[in-house]
Amino acid sequence: MLAFCIRRIAQAAVVMLVVGLIAFALFRFVGDPVVFMLGQDATPQDRARMSAELGLDQPFHLQYARFVGRALHGEFGLSLRQLRPVSTLFRERLPATLELAIAAALFALAVGIPMGVYAALRRRSWLTQAFLVLSLAGVALPTFLIGILLILVFAVQLGWLPSFGRGETVALGAWSTGLLTASGLKALILPAITLGLYQMTLIMRLTRAEMLEVLRTDYIRFARARGLTDRAVYFRHGLYNTLVPVITIAGLQLGSIIAFAIITETVFQWPGMGLLFIQSVMFADVPVMAAYLCLIALVFVVINFVVDLLYHVVDPRLRLELAAAR
Amino acid sequence: MKRTFSRIAFGALACVLVSAADAATLRFANQGDALSMDPHMHNEAVLLSLTGNVYESLTGRGRKFETTPELATDWKQTAPTVWRFNLRKGVKFHDGTPFTADDVIFSFERARGEGSDVKVYVSAIKEIRKVDAHAIDIVTTDPFLILPQTVSRWYVMSKSWCEKNNATRPADVRKGGENYATLRANGTGPFMLKSREPGVRTVFTANPDWWGKVEHNVTEAIFTPIGNDATRVAALVSGEIDMMDPLPLQDVPRVQSNPNLKVMQSPELRTIFLGMDQKRDELLHSNIKGRNPFKDVRVRRAFYQAIDIEAIRTRIMRGVSTPTGLMVAPDTQGFAPELNKRLPYDLEAAKKLMAEAGYPSGFEVGMNCPNDRYVNDSEICQAIAAMLAKIGVKVNLVAESKSLFFPKVIGRNVSFYLAGWTPASQDSHNALFAVMSTPGEGAQGQFNGGAYSNPRLDELTRKIGAENDTARRNAMIAEAFKIHQDDIGHIPLHQQPITWGMKKTVEMVQLPDNFLYMRWVMVK
């Protein structure tokens, strides 16, 4: 087990290094931040000096080595746009993104699973057809369009929900939460639906397919033969066995929810990491972009690692394979 | 007991109702946020506009954009290079400390020192001498006629506050970034900074002890940056904000047709123009090898006359741009109205000029254009490409983000490009110096991306910089503009509009600098 962990951590480290390298290589094409940092009346000498002070004139491999060296200490340097430490900016923005991502994931599970179960049990009902059409729309429509449509209906036409921002927030230590105020909760609804819709349709379709599969198996037939109620058959025996793959996929999708939050955050002016990233791209703020990409890569790596570990805990066959290999 | 409670509740309710009648909250949005609350950190419009409500300068701007007394009550030239400024008495910073000459001198050192990005506003000043606590002498290197206008964007900070909080320099990259003044502010202005969450929300409250005559009824102002155009418009239409800037041109009719909303528009100080590489012997991006067609004034003139500025104004700018024949806007000091005439749009003449210059069937040229900097910038470039096709010029358009575009213009790695310039000093000399002069020492000609050069214009620009007589100065500016026009050093296009969308219940003053002056906001 320990050997397995070490191997996975080594693999993760390689992944992180490669992501950093690719990110850094790409940033050579986003432009020169010094032009914006110094404003329109700066002299060429001013710009050259600033470039040298930031180390932007150094060759690529040196800049990358410096970046990796600092990142190992958890330090990502200063945002060129705001002249504030990247770590501070992330600390300010992370709660917003995490709250949004978790709300979106919960929405996707809480709505997607019941819909999927219903669609599996009542295959020919008109509601099932409606769900399937809806899920097709959820997959096909781009996020920004869904966001704009929701804003149009619920903020502009009906005036029920805010069209932008996070509402009032309450600071709990370093964590600023919008979950404790009415305006914060109201502001969360539209972005969470926008962000979670794609995942919801995915979970619904997965639940439906798995459920149909499970309902065809022998032990469901035996359960029926024993005279169990429909409820016991469907929910205790059917749904439980359906949920294992669903939860796995949902967990893995959490990473992509955080990553895809960029678009939703831009549409709703949600002050999270994704919005910070977009603002940084426009300014060619390399330290923020590099740190963001590394952080997202880290999220994926950690989630995958945890899932792998859980498999080992859950599935005895994998442990046996490992023992045989040894 | 119950009755007492209800009486208290009623009393409280009455208080709320009364205060709601005359006090008002202003909620406004911009597409970007100020990058700091430190007024010396960036020379950037949103930052200077927002902090300009908290901090003040020696001189300010009136409702007609005229220069008005602010922290200085009056000023006069006592010698060609010496200006006496008498400072306003009884002014207090928001932390209660009195404003004196020491604060001005401290702010001068801070603004011209390391890490400051507003050096341009004080670069003409050699030193500031304290006469007494409320009078100073500003000594300039050369006679500097426009000093009172130039200092209006150089904000005065409190010496004791900055020293106490370790913020005597603007936040510096080399020393670990932010400092106390990045997120806090202590000025003398009509509004105080209450809270600041970068990129999220900035809250201002009215300063009850402000020295000036209060001409607003705003008690609290909440600023939110909303980057996405559609979201910003939706927030205005749904009533969540009272005012927003900029309103995208395509949404103007929609906002105008809403009974609760209105649109405020006026020309900005920025002039949009085209530049052409006139230095290289062979263009970087063209199919003509061994020579540079732009060195021939006939080609430049043909380009000018091939551009249908009316079509750009009506189709792309939706009728709200102001076509211009000069490189500066009408509110700029030294603007010469008699010269503000464009060459006529005349395709036949343009074709003839191209033929005379030896390009009867045109040529190919690469054009660089930003797509996120000016109002409808890449659309203008597309239209110009289509117009030039009529005289046989094939334009290969590269429209890209400003972070990629500007380094190319500043590095003069462009053949043909679209850009814009606002003179920071709101004076013609700045445009002559930065955009039209031959690229040279320091900032001279640094935004002259095509390296247009005329020695007489350079000489005039130098003289204008040190001229102490307004009439003579304006005559020289006009002469320089005439030279540039005859040479077609650049092709001026238009002043783009400032477009605000707001509720009908809000009254504001819109000046060509596109600043938001909260001191003149009335909310009904």
Image: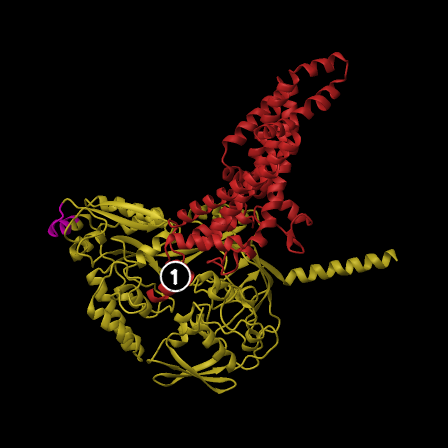
Chain colours: A red, B yellow
Q: Is residue B347 above or below residue B169?
A: above
Q: Nearer the viewer, residue B162 or B121?
A: B162
Q: Is residue B245 visible?
A: no
Predominant SS along the magenta part:
helix
Q: Nearer the viewer, residue A20 or B278?
A: A20
Q: Numbered disc 1: what chain?
A: A
Residue under the point 53% across and 37% down: A146
The segment highlighted magenta reads B351-360
Q: Farthest front residue?
A: A326
Where residue B202 appears, as percent x and y from the top left, is: 57, 59
Q: Nearer the viewer, residue A26 or B265?
A: A26
Q: Quadrant of the C terminus of chain A?
A: top right
Does B121 appear in magenta?
no
Helix, strand or loop for disc 1:
helix
Where residue A244 appears, as percent x and y from the top left, is: 64, 28
Where residue B350 appears, as percent x and y from the top left, is: 18, 50
Q: Nearer the viewer, residue B253 or A304?
A: A304
Left or right: A89, with B364 as reference point = right
Residue under the point 29% across and 46% down: B397
Residue under the point 49% across and 49% down: A277
Q: Is residue B390 above or below residue B71?
A: above
Q: Residues within 10 Å of mark 1 (few under 14, many from 20)?
A: some
Q: Is residue B284 visible?
A: yes
- Residue type at mark 1 is Ser
Left or right: B6, with B27 as reference point = right
Identify residue for label 1.
Answer: A51
Where residue A32 appears, as percent x and y from the top left, is: 38, 55
The image quarter containing residue A133 is: top right
Q: Quadrant of the N terminus of chain A?
A: top right
